Image (tube, rainbow, N blue to C red):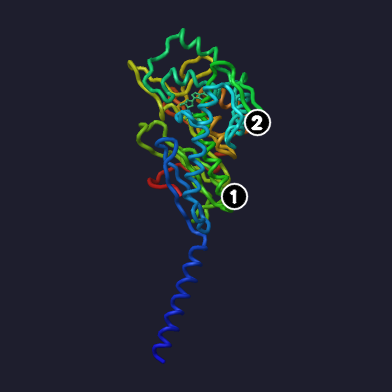
Amino acid sequence: MNKKRLIIFGIGLAVTFLIVSYLRKDAPRLFHIQGQTMGTIIYNVKYVASEVDGLDAMISQELRDFNQSLSTYISDSEISRLNKTGSLTYESKFIYPVLKASKEVFDQTRGTFDPSLGPLVQAWGFGPDKNVPNPDSAKVDSLKAVIGFGRVSFDENQVSLPTNFQLDFSAIAKGYAVDVVAELLEEKGIENYMVEIGGEVRCRGRNDQDKPWALGIEDPTVQSNEQKLMAIVRLKNLSLATSGNYRNYFEKEGKIYAHIIDPRTGYTAKHNLLSASVFASDCMTADAYATAFMVLGLEYSKEIMNAQNLDAILIYRSENGIESFVSEGIRPFLEMNNAEGELK
Ligand code: AMP
Ligand code: MG
């Protein structure tokens, strides 16, 4: 009898344990997935939902597929093959959307966002081959003949490039990858998430403290290997991308060469803007405009923000030191950051 009771008790305990673990697995909680993509870029995915089995592997696979399509660092990627042969019938789902978004931003920014800058990017040493000498003016002039995204023709199925053209989506790829991961989460029914890849972010819904996720604005005056946030913005359903000269430049003979090139001159962009953080509903658009703003400078960027109804935080150098311009739509949501530590 005692033995029977013991068995029943044992079974009861096991069933309770199974039910509790099942309920725990199903209860919405905060999950954090971290990984590396596009070489050494770190990504963070946080979501509040019930656990989705295998999501970690799905995200890394999606990012591998993304790179195999769009990375100019992979010699047999779809984009590298397009650059070699001059034409491509799309194989992956990734190329057409990025061409379409690029054309839109190219048209809206007086051609200052231009993914056909590939040859100039290479010549300035910001492409896969870093060991190139600075181009002289004759070289820059000759390369200017093989750029201009307006001359790239594409439709829903294929793209073809004029002779010697090269496409490079570095200025939009991180933002685009953020959107791709966000879409994957939405397909899995996740409604509260934050996806961040190398500083470009998209969020939706609320965090585990039932607040909108915090988007951080970096202090552009801090050295590139450190990170300090100067402000945070809490908003539901929004993307943020930042472009800034402080993040990627090289110094040669006392001169600073930014990694952003002005397609109108063929030289690296030079003005007082230190960083542009652009908000948009999708991260690919935010990323493209952020790069264009770094070419356009403060005043033209403001004009485009008004015309396109975009919000941004522009940090610039003036006679009074470092100043920032915060567009009206963002102002009510901006909190200056005093706290150190991780954002939630
Ligand atoms: P981001 O950090 O998003 O501003 O991207 C900068 C990268 O985009 C550079 O390292 C170049 O590979 C490429 N790039 C530079 N200038 C431009 C431009 N005007 N339009 C598009 N891509 C550019
Ligand atoms: Mg960009």
Residue at the (47%, 56%) spot, across then down: 30
- Farthest residue to the right: give it: 155
Q: Secondary structure at mark 1?
A: helix
| Residue 277 in the image, given as x and y percentages of width and height | 50, 34
Tell me: residue 302, above or below residue 216: above
Q: Is residue 61 left or right of residue 106?
A: left
Question: N-terminal of the two: label 2 or label 1?
Answer: 2
**Amino acid type of the residue tagged 2 in the rendering:** Asn
Whether label 2 lies within 8 Å of ligand 1 gets the answer no
* Residue 63 in the image: above or below residue 71: below
Q: Residue furthest bottom?
A: 1
User: Is residue 275 visible in the rendered structure shown here?
Assistant: no
For the residue marked with disc 1, what is the amino acid? Glu
Q: Which residue is mark 1?
A: 187
Figure check: 316 above or below 208: above
Q: Quadrant of residue 136?
A: top left
- Residue at 47% across, 70% down: 20
Q: Nearer the viewer, residue 333 or 15?
A: 15
Of residues 36 and 210, the one drawn nearer to the viewer in this rendering:
36
The image position of residue 331, as x and y in percent, is 55, 39
Q: Secondary structure at mark 2?
A: loop
Name the quarter where the N terminus is drawn. bottom left
How many labels, in total? 2
**Pointer 2 residue:** 157
Task: Give the Cα separation between the discs numbered 2 and 1.
Answer: 24 Å
* Residue 260 seen from this side: yes
The answer as to whether callout 1 falls within 8 Å of ligand 2 is no
